[in-house]
Image: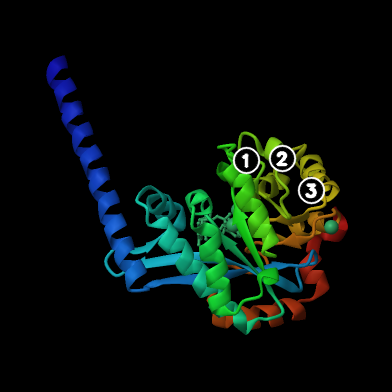
Amino acid sequence: AAKADGRGRWAFFEQSMEEQVRTRENLAHALRRAIDTESLHVLYQPQTTIDGRTVLSVEALLRWTDPDMGAISPSVFVPIAEETGLINDLGLYVLRQACTDARAWPHLGLAVNVSPTQFRHPRFIDDLRETLEQAGFDPARLEIEVTETVFATSSPEVMETLTRVQEMGVRVALDDFGVGYSSLSYLRRFPFDTLKIDRSFIADLEIGAHAHSILSTIIDLGEALGMKVVAEGIETAHQVAILQRTNCDKLQGFFMSRPVPPEQIRGVEDRLAAAQPDAATGPALTI
Ligand code: C2E
Ligand code: MG
Ligand code: MG
Ligand code: MG
């Protein structure tokens, strides 16, 4: 009976592996089609001043809705695009689209995520320069967001690419700061312009006893190293209030605005500007 059980499990295991591969292949195939037919779209999430009332920039966030499979999260399809070599085309698509859309908001900065594979691609610098030129987009408005996995291979090429991006006038943000293994060592070795504190540190504010101290220490560290500091994942007025008492430079999160289609950015700006200061700070005054 034990043997049969074992075989049964094995057969089940095999099948699910095969199924997984098939799903991945289906996804990769569908994604290829989506890139070719440009049926992807880009949403934009505001990054605001520390009071949450003035939009300073927007982060481009890719969305994919497949006709058959429905909406698929970037945390699912971006890794697949990385593994299947689609990420460069995908990344370029987002960059082009974002530079085009952002012409409607000349007063705002634009942040675009760049995956590790895309960043390390030999053509990345040329692609970036060509895209900016073709879109007639001011490099000084653009910031690329990279995660620390880019820097895990300590090749001279990575430093070289970072330097060349910055020489172009484009800024570089370290995204999801604080959740990786070596965040601090990368901070010491690479000259980022901006530090984006991972949203888990913001969520911790509601529960962790030391969360306040950890958060404000990270912010002060970024500040001391001459970086702009952005807090991600702001969901409550209480969190806004806490951040207002730190040296943080920008806020981003559902409390101010979810990612929205480009035509809604002006409306979000108006809504935030019109918000009552008391509504934005809320329980602030009582903490
Ligand atoms: P990210 O770059 O750290 O982007 C922030 C993510 O947090 C977005 O998820 C955003 O919708 C979400 N978010 C923003 N505010 C809040 C909040 O207050 N609460 C919570 N719970 N979440 C919030 P999204 O759009 O699903 O993207 C997930 C990740 O997928 C991104 O993380 C980024 O790593 C990747 N991604 C998205 N678009 C692109 C892209 O165009 N290129 C690349 N390479 N990666 C992308
Ligand atoms: Mg990002
Ligand atoms: Mg992030
Ligand atoms: Mg500051």
Up the image or down, 244 lies above or below 102; here it is above
Closer mark to the observer between disc 1 and disc 2: 2
Closer to the camera, 89 or 178?
Answer: 89
As shown in the figure, which amino acid type bears the numbered disc 2? Arg
Give me the C-alpha separation between circle 1 and circle 3.
15 Å
Q: Residue at x 82, y 72 (%)?
A: 277
Visible residue check, residue 43 = no
Q: Dot 1, crowdedness within 10 Å: few (<14), some or many (≥20)?
A: some
Q: Which residue is mark 2?
A: 189
* Quarter of the image where one finds residue 65: bottom left
Give me the C-alpha separation between circle 1 and circle 2.
17 Å
Q: Position of residue 130 (x, y in %)?
A: 53, 70
Task: Say which quadrant the N terminus sits in.
Answer: top left
Residue 170 - label = none
Q: Dot 2, crowdedness within 10 Å: few (<14), some or many (≥20)?
A: few
Q: Is mark 2 within 8 Å of ligand 3?
A: no
Q: Residue at x 22, y 44 (%)?
A: 19
Q: Would residue 172 appear left or right of 130 to someone viewing this image? A: right
Up the image or down, 126 lies above or below 212; here it is below
Q: Which residue is mark 3?
A: 222
Of mark 1 and mark 2, the one earlier in the sequence is: 1
* Quarter of the image where one finds residue 81: bottom left
Residue 179 - label = 1
Give me the C-alpha separation between circle 2 and circle 3.
13 Å
Closer to the camera, 7 or 247?
Answer: 247
Q: Secondary structure at mark 3?
A: helix
As shown in the figure, which amino acid type bears the numbered disc 1? Val
Q: Secondary structure at mark 2?
A: helix
Closer mark to the observer between disc 2 and disc 3: 2
Up the image or down, 8 lies above or below 167; here it is above
Q: Position of residue 54 (x, y in %)?
A: 76, 74
Q: Secondary structure at mark 1?
A: loop
